[in-house]
Amino acid sequence: MQEIKKIETLEDIKLLVDEFYGRIRQDELLADIFNGVIEDQWPAHLEKMYTFWQTVLLKEHTYYGSPFTPHATLPVEKQHFERWLKLFHETLDAHFHGEKADEAKWRAERMAEMFLYKIKYYQENHSKPLL
């Protein structure tokens, strides 16, 4: 059985990201969306996610970019974000505990809330963000 531990290193971040996106790639609701957009660029996407969460959770600034922009025109709704969060929480709970795991959940919830709000706005107003 996998040891449940604290998030402390880049290796922990990689475990979180790899396991989470492994679940996404198999999920009946999310797989087609993610696989359709990312296609054969999964290694590059995972690397970007490592740096994102490394920056957020470990305070090691390795991510440069705008997290929302690539998601702005995705065909997603509330149910997609709910499933994304469910899988994220399940992945965290299966491997991690502690303050950083709780922070990861909180930050993911805020991102999902903000992304859904902004995507809905752009869909309803037939517009796109300035890139």
Image (cartoon, rainbow, N blue to C red):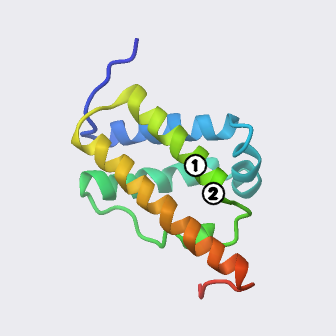
**Looking at the picture, which amino acid does disc 2 mark?**
Lys
Q: Nearer the viewer, residue 28 or 5?
A: 28
Q: Residue at x 70, y 65 (%)?
A: 74
**Looking at the picture, which amino acid does disc 1 mark?**
Glu
Q: Are marks 2 and 1 in contact (CB under 8 Å)?
A: yes
**Quadrant that contains the C terminus:** bottom right
Q: Secondary structure at mark 1?
A: helix
Image height check: is 43 above or below 63?
above
Q: Nearer the viewer, residue 84 or 33?
A: 84
Horizontal placement of 122 versus 20: left or right? right
**Quadrant that contains the N terminus:** top left
Q: Secondary structure at mark 2?
A: helix
Horizontal placement of 119 versus 115: left or right? right
Q: What label sits on residue 8 in the rendered view? A: none
Q: Residue at x 44, y 54 (%)?
A: 109
Q: CA distance from mark 2 to mark 1?
A: 6 Å
For label 1, the crowd category at 10 Å Cα-Cα, with few meaning under 14, some 14 to 19 and many 20 or more, is some
Q: Position of residue 87 (x, y in %)?
A: 54, 38
For label 2, the crowd category at 10 Å Cα-Cα, with few meaning under 14, some 14 to 19 and many 20 or more, is few
Q: Nearer the viewer, residue 88 or 5?
A: 88
Q: Residue at x 74, y 63 (%)?
A: 75
Query: Residue 60 is drawn in which quadrant?
Result: bottom left
Identify residue for label 1: 82
Q: Position of residue 38 (x, y in %)?
A: 69, 55
Q: Position of residue 103 (x, y in %)?
A: 30, 49
Identify residue for label 2: 78
Q: Count up the numbered dots.
A: 2
Q: Position of residue 23 (x, y in %)?
A: 60, 35
Q: Residue at x 51, y 46 (%)?
A: 85
Horizontal placement of 115 versus 12: left or right? right
* Residue that lies at the very extreme toward the top in this rendered image: 1
Q: Nearer the viewer, residue 78 or 62?
A: 78
